[in-house]
Amino acid sequence: MPIIKNLEDLKRVREEAHENRKRETAAGQIELIVGLSTCGIAAGARDILKAILEDIQNNNRVRIVVRQTGCIGLCEKEPIVQVVVGDQPKVTYGKVTPEIARRILADHVAGGKVLQNHVINL
Amino acid sequence: MRTIRSMVLVSNDLISMQRGAQDVYDRLQAEIKAYGLDQEISLAMVSDVGRHDALPLVIVYPEAVVYGPLKVEDVHGLVEEHLYKGRIVVNLQASNRELSGKIAWLNTRKGTLPAEQRIVLRRAGIIDPTNIEDYILNDGYATLGKALTYMTPAQVIDEVKKSGLRGRGGAGFPTGTKWGFVAKEKSPKKYVICNADESEPGTYKDRLILEGDPHSIIEALAIAAFAVGADEGYIYIRGEYKLAQERLKLAILQAEEMGFLGQNIFGTAFNFDLRIHCGAGAYICGEETALLESIEGKRGQPRTRPPFPTTHGLFGKPTLVNNVETLANVPPILLNGATWYRSFGTLSSPGTKVFTILGNVNTTRLIEVPMGITLREVIGIYAHGMKNGANFKLAQTGGSSGSIIPASLQDTPMDFDSFAKAGVALGSGALLICNEDTCVVDLAKVLLNFFRTESCGKCFPCRIGTQRACEMLEAIADGRATLKTLDQLMDLSTTLVNLSNCGLGQTAGTPLKDILTYFRAEVEAHIRLGVCPAGVCNTTEAVQ
């Protein structure tokens, strides 16, 4: 990481990061974002994360980035998994179980079909 | 968050339910779905609206139109005309005769849809908290750069003062004024401290801010240090918040690596070091002077004030102590200006407040809404109504240290001044919503037992008072008390509020006063009739 000496540096770092992100999404990168705050973890988000990582490894899925985030304010719907495919809008799944997580990867990520039954409307 | 264009509220107090409010609600739900409007219209039950002449009532926002009395047959026309085509159905409207008093809030809200407004939590749930790049991408550290490069400390304080930001820890002290006190002290060494010892039962807003967006607190602390002239800071974090601690530690390392902490930040002469200090599970250490003692390595007991921490704080040096949520408000204020910040909330309490909703409601959750929203709106809109259609009885604000708010005050705007005028306190932002199965004596017993256990024992009103209050409440619950006990309890409440050394003892007296003011009849029933109206307490001892 570069050391920030002034506002120009900060701006440059931000723009570089922005360019990187844009390139990645344009290349059809898939992002799976798991809500890993205390509420998520208590509801079993760590198991979901594990299931997702195992599934990616077992099925040799490529171009998938798994990230974590904090609480989005819907603690009751945890564990929450958000899926971003390329530059399409974000899809948010609530009350995810390891089984549903595997189906998200198989149907939504690989097959392009959203699991309507488990989507939360934000 | 889902954007809704309209909101439909159905009254569900006892009379409405007898007159078929449930059928109206079910039909509304079916009709809204039939028209395919269920994604854009929210439907919820609100309890007593105060119009007993026209029940069951249906209120449609944002036009704030009141329909009633409504029959099931009317629903189809209402949905088609108003919700689908957007025309007000005049012949179904309730008369304007009683549009005052309790539902005056309808008129003040006309044309506005109270919506969630995220300032503090704008990045939580969107960015990866362990990745500083994500934070920078979302305007991170730009405010610190702006403040250090273009502003003087006096300008920063002035902007915070102008924004009208008030402390979000519960007391509501103007933040800018506090910063000014520390800034004007002439001392070579000053400290800034972030109070993250959030121990109020039911409050978890600070934890989620720290877990979801740790860098924002680091940035805000650096700004605060620059403004008051400090070069060292502490984050006093609750011992149980392991995940938040990990993320903060990582965030501090990342910030140091990139030069946002340390020497000559942004190429200026400003130096700032930040440390984490973990609490060890004492509730009292959330009190600012006890917190200072704890950092100094002493027993966590509150100091006598004055002198205040702003002049004699940590290690006897001027110290600024701010709550997590207060600090999280600072970068957006400096980035967008005080005028922008003042556009949210009320005149005396600008900005937003993070609330955690829990209890007998359909959805327990974390919300950030403009100050001045009412409890009725919080329950009806964000909590999606009471669980099983029960009636709202009371709300306990701010974990333990708030007030017990009866249903009659649920239309009071939730800001510091309106609440103070009504004689209740806003507290730290937890809203425990209770239905009619809750016994106030039992509730007070639980609260006082908490205070009794957590009292540090330094001053005797608190040490002995909380113990005696517990015993009295137990006597009332068991049916052993006499009416004289109530007078003694009221007396004790005054003693606790007036004579305790710190906030713990002072707030311990509040629930006692509240139950005797708002729920006297229910408390007396335990004594006079030997019966607990809610069926919670076991008063059999009196019978024997």
Image (spheres, rainbow, N blue to C red):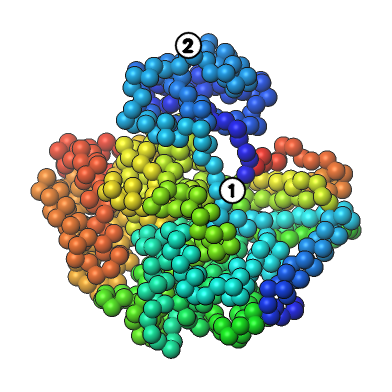
Outermost residue, bottom side: B188
Relative vertical location of residue B311 with respect to residue A114 in this rendering, above or below: below
Q: Position of residue B21 (x, y in %)?
A: 46, 21
What residue is drawn where x is 27% and y is 52%?
B511
Q: Position of residue A110 (x, y in %)?
A: 87, 48
Q: Position of residue B268 (x, y in %)?
A: 61, 83
Q: Nearer the viewer, residue A83 or B144?
A: B144
Mark 1, Cα crowd under 10 Å, few <14 / some 14-19 / many 20+, is many
The local secondary structure at tag 1 comes to loop
Marker disc for residue B194: none
Q: Position of residue B162 (x, y in %)?
A: 45, 61
Q: Nearer the viewer, mark 1 or mark 2?
A: 2
**Observer able to see residue B416:** yes
Q: Quadrant of residue B150?
A: bottom right
Q: Is residue B400 left or right of residue B497?
A: right
Q: Tag 2, which chain?
A: B
Relative vertical location of residue B79 with respect to residue B104 in this rendering, above or below: above
Residue kind at label 1, given as amino acid type: Leu
Residue kind at label 2, given as amino acid type: Asn
Residue indicated by mark 1: A74
Q: Tag 1, which chain?
A: A
Q: Is residue B445 left or right of residue B21?
A: left
Marker disc for residue B91: 2
Q: Nearer the viewer, residue B451 or A31?
A: A31
What residue is drawn where x is 36% and y is 69%?
B287
What residue is drawn where x is 82% and y is 64%?
A20
What residue is drawn where x is 66% and y is 20%?
B34
Q: Are marks 1 and 2 in contact (CB under 8 Å)?
A: no
Q: Quadrant of the C terminus of chain B?
A: top left
Q: Quadrant of residue B468?
A: bottom left
Outermost residue, left side: B484
Q: Is residue A61 left or right of residue B118?
A: right
